Image (spheres, rainbow, N blue to C red):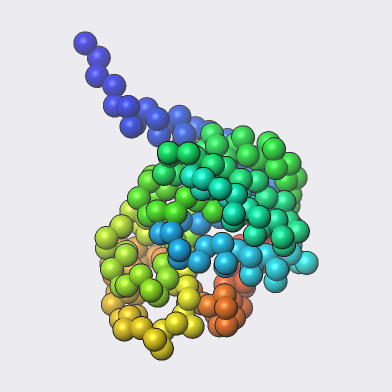
Amino acid sequence: MKIIDVKKDVLSKNDEIAAGIRGKLKDKGILALNFISSPGSGKTTLLVKTIEDLKSRIPIAVIEGDQQTDNDAKRIAATGVPVIQINTQSSCHLDAAMVEGALEKLGFVGPGLLFIENVGNLVCPASYDLGEEMKVALVSVTEGEDKPVKYPKAFRSSSAMVITKTDLLPHLDLDMARLLDYSTKVNPALKVFHLSAKSGDGLDDWYGFLLSMYHSLNP
């Protein structure tokens, strides 16, 4: 009798595909970032603003993940950059095979930035490598302080955390010190950005981070 660990087997195959994607993207000078967050954190809004401000400086493409609709892909398409929608139906996350297929259809030759907007939740997306350079976890100030400790794997597997909608802070009782303390306990190496896509506060630091990473890949 042989017992198969199904989850391990599925993730092993996913990681194999992801490694292939990562190698191809690196060869093309494409920096890929995988955005994960709860629904409504402001992923698409931040992407639209980032694209509008950086597209004249760096080629950008986007892969959009949602269970249903192409609403977010339409918002991205309005900026004029290449975008492809993946509808996962009942699945709660993107996987490497989905991204591999999307990249073939997208035809993004690089060099440039590739943003992958994952399905909105902080559980399943944390376990799946998509071939990205890094995961970026987003949390809005309206979500409270305890997201990092409630969903530690999402923040532990991410290299950066973006705290969004900071323009709303005067109207909330958020304990920012506690949020930062929780995130540090989960991942001391997490790079943190505070920003508002609406007011523009903090965007320069975010853009500087993206440009620095991109130019490190494409000196």
- Name the residue furthest bottom: 170
Q: Is residue 195 left or right of residue 51?
A: left
- Name the residue furthest top: 1
Picture quadrant of residue 59 = bottom right
Q: Is residue 145 left or right of residue 140?
A: left
Report the front residue among 97 and 29.
97
Residue 204 lies, in percent from the top left, at 61, 78
Residue at 65 percent across and 46 percent down: it is 84
Q: Check the picture and name the quadrant holding the C terminus.
A: bottom right
Report the front residue among 99 and 210.
99
Q: Check the picture and name the quadrant holding the N terminus.
A: top left
- When the figure is inspected, residue 57 is found, relative to residue 111, above or below; the finding is below
Residue at 31 percent across and 57 percent down: it is 151
- Name the residue furthest right: 56
Residue at 52 percent across and 62 percent down: it is 43
Residue at 47 percent across and 73 percent down: it is 164
- When the figure is inspected, residue 6 is found, relative to residue 106, above or below; the finding is above
Residue 87 lies, in percent from the top left, at 54, 42
Residue 72 lies, in percent from the top left, at 59, 56
Q: Is residue 54 left or right of residue 19?
A: right
- Name the residue furthest left: 1
Residue 69 appears in the figure: yes
Picture quadrant of residue 150 = bottom left
The image shows a total of numbered marks equal to 0
Report the front residue among 24 and 200.
200
Residue 116 appears in the figure: no
Residue 2 lies, in percent from the top left, at 25, 14
Picture quadrant of residue 20 = top right
Q: Is residue 135 left or right of residue 198?
A: left
